[in-house]
Image (cartoon, rainbow, N blue to C red):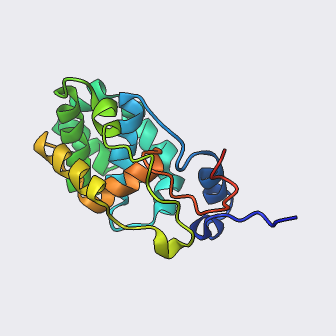
């Protein structure tokens, strides 16, 4: 009998990481608000541990109206100040303002945010055997970041775009043999 493995990053953060790895990361996620949440959270994660964001995710959802694009796009300077005072989230003015800006940019996308992001899916990406095989960026993530920036998005560089692609299933970077790869 073969021993089941998990991607090594999933084993160091306790139950919250294991659940995220096994049930969410790399699974196809669509819908404009759903994808917007992930774009926003990936931007908030920049420079921090993803575990920090996972632990604060419910607070983020409450603070940002469940990441409803129209609601966040309507935020004012008062909302920025409210968010800066919310100890349950990452209180970084540039990231908060980027989330609001990105909601406004998402409203202007003719086919929606989910459709735009999913147009960069790479189902034929190679299956990584080790964590060393998992890139930080790809040509696809560079192209996605460039396209999002063209539409006015901020905090969406190629590394953040690739993390988004991994998280919502545009690529499947679960390692070969990982218990979550085929779920």
Instruction: State which quadrant residue 100 falls in.
Output: top left
**Residue 19 appears in the figure:** yes
**Residue 93 appears in the figure:** no
- Tell me how many marks there are: 0
| 52 vs 129, nearest the viewer | 129
Image quarter (top left, top right, bottom left or bottom right) of the N terminus = bottom right
Residue 134 vertical position relative to residue 144 in the rendered view, above or below: below
Q: Position of residue 44 (x, y in %)?
A: 34, 55
Residue 74 vertical position relative to residue 22 in the rendered view, above or below: above
Viewed as shown, does residue 65 lie left or right of 11?
left
Image quarter (top left, top right, bottom left or bottom right) of the C terminus = top right
Which residue is located at x 67 percent, y 61 percent? 177
| 169 vs 78, nearest the viewer | 169
Residue 114 vertical position relative to residue 99 in the rendered view, above or below: above
Which residue is most to the right? 1
Viewed as shown, does residue 47 lie left or right of 60?
left
| 136 vs 66, nearest the viewer | 136
Q: Position of residue 162 (x, y in %)?
A: 35, 56
Q: Position of residue 20 (x, y in %)?
A: 59, 51
Q: Position of residue 41 (x, y in %)?
A: 38, 49
Viewed as shown, does residue 182 lie left or right of 46?
right
Which residue is most to the bottom? 132
Instruction: State which quadrant residue 37 falls in.
Output: top left
Which residue is located at x 59 percent, y 63 percent? 175
């Amino acid at each position: 009998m073969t021993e089941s493995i998990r991607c090594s990053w999933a084993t160091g953060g306790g139950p919250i990481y294991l659940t995220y790895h096994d049930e969410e990361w790399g699974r196809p996620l669509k819908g404009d608000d759903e994808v917007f949440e992930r774009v926003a959270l990936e931007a908030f994660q920049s420079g921090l541990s993803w575990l920090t964001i996972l632990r604060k995710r419910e607070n983020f959802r409450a603070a940002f109206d469940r990441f409803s694009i129209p609601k966040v796009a309507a935020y004012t300077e008062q909302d920025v100040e409210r968010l800066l005072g919310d100890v349950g989230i990452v209180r970084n003015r540039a990231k908060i303002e980027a989330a609001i800006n990105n909601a406004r940019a998402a409203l202007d996308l003719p086919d929606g945010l989910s459709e735009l992001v999913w147009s960069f899916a790479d189902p034929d990406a190679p299956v990584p055997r080790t964590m060393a095989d998992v890139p930080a960026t790809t040509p696809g993530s560079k192209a996605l970041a460039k396209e999002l920036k063209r539409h006015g998005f901020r905090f969406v560089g190629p590394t953040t775009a690739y993390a988004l692609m991994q998280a919502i299933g545009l690529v499947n970077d679960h390692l070969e043999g990982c218990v979550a790869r085929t779920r």
